[in-house]
Image (cartoon, rainbow, N blue to C red):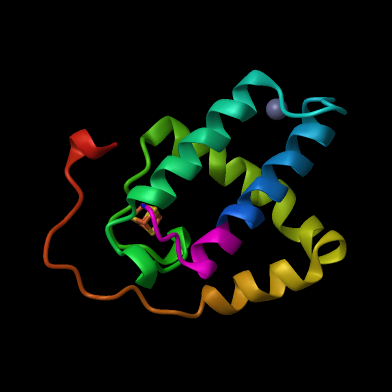
Amino acid sequence: MSEFPDRLRRERVTIDQMIALYCREQHASPDGLCPDCVSLQEYTHQRLEKCVFGAEKPTCANCPVHCYRADMRAKVREVMRYAGPRMLLRHPVLTVRHLLDGRRAAPKLIRRAKPQDR
Ligand code: SF4
Ligand SMILES: [Zn+2]
């Protein structure tokens, strides 16, 4: 995507912060991400860029499509479960904006994501 909307850019920063927090505290990774978390981060970026909703993207938790592969979905849920409550203290502005984004309903889709897009 050449023009990456600001809201999606912010969502990418939020997930990056959550993965970094999780990796630092759960994988004892003080400088940068462990290889597993690098893969997860790259995967989340790719999903974000290919999201079928484009600039109208809802939060993934509110999404009727769920384009994530099952293994990556499980990993990202684990990260969210751990980092979500801790983010409010460490990155309050990002967290509040993400919570507000979570109130957006998913727009109607003409076509659903194909499995090979995953
Ligand atoms: S889960 Fe839904 S909102 Fe999240 S990236 Fe995939 S299609 Fe977009
Ligand atoms: Zn890690």
State the residue at coordinates (36%, 35%).
69
Residue 32 drawn above or below residue 9 = above
Is 103 located above or below residue 15 in the figure?
below
The quadrant where ligand 2 appears is top right
10 part of magenta stretch: yes
Name the one closer to the observer, 9 or 78. 9
Q: Which residue is at 38% across, 35% downward?
A: 70
Q: Where does the image place residue 42, in percent across and percent down from the top left?
A: 52, 34
- Is residue 75 left or right of 22 when viewed as pictured? left
**Relative horizontal placement of residue 35, taking residue 93 as reference (left or right):** left
Give the residues drawn in magenta, as a range. 2-11
Question: Residue 22 occupies which quadrant of the picture?
Answer: top right
31 shown above or below 113: above
Taking the view exactly as shown, the residue that stands out farthest to the front is 2
**Residue beneath the point at 82% across and 34% down:** 24
Q: Is residue 58 left or right of residue 37?
A: left
Camera-side residue of 1 and 99: 1
Residue 19 image point, x, y percent: 68, 41
> The C terminus is located in which quarter?
top left
Name the residue located 44 percent from the left edge and 79 percent from the top edge.
104
